[in-house]
Amino acid sequence: KLQILVFVGMLESYGEGAGDESYVHYTKGGMPGYYPPIVGKGGGQIGLNLYKPFDIFPEQDEAQKTRGRQVEINNGRLAMLGLMSLLTESNGLIVPPLDGIESFPKYAGNVMIPFSADFSLF
């Protein structure tokens, strides 16, 4: 677990401003969803980018890129909504779409345990 957290933290810190000088953060007018290229970074050890690592897909025009960004934002919102509905239903709270499913399993544990004082990564 700790390796995953460290790896994601490294990517987040790079994406939040450790990239190239032309990068503008999305809260300061930059493009949401843009991640600076990482090829050649880390002393030359990184050989592929995170987005389009092999560059095998054709280029898109601006209208297609705009639509793709909007679709990605909507998918993320829907995923968050679905996850929250499953968490609330598993705790016994009333979620109208899931109440009709008789065999929906109830979670007996504490879904908020990662935020408690006695949580450990090991």
Image (cartoon, rainbow, N blue to C red):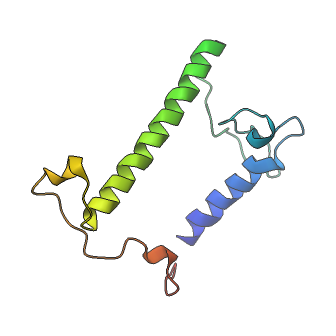
- Residue at 61% across, 30% down: 54
Residue 96 in the figure: left or right of residue 60: left
Residue 57 in sight: no
Location of residue 46 with respect to 62 vertically, above or below? below
Residue 77 in sight: yes
Quadrant of res 58? top right
- Residue furthest toward the left? 102
69 or 37, nearer to the observer: 69
- Image label count: 0
- Residue at 33% across, 53% down: 85
Location of residue 79 with respect to 112 vertically, above or below? above
Location of residue 111 with respect to 7 vertically, above or below? below
On the image, the x and y values in percent for residue 97 come to 22, 46
18 or 57, nearer to the observer: 18
- Residue furthest toward the bottom? 118
Location of residue 69 with respect to 90 vertically, above or below? above
- Residue at 41% across, 41% down: 78
- Residue at 25% across, 75% down: 108
On the image, the x and y values in percent for residue 116 come to 49, 81
79 or 52, nearer to the observer: 79
26 or 119, nearer to the observer: 26
On the image, the x and y values in percent for residue 73 come to 53, 35
On the image, the x and y values in percent for residue 9 come to 67, 60
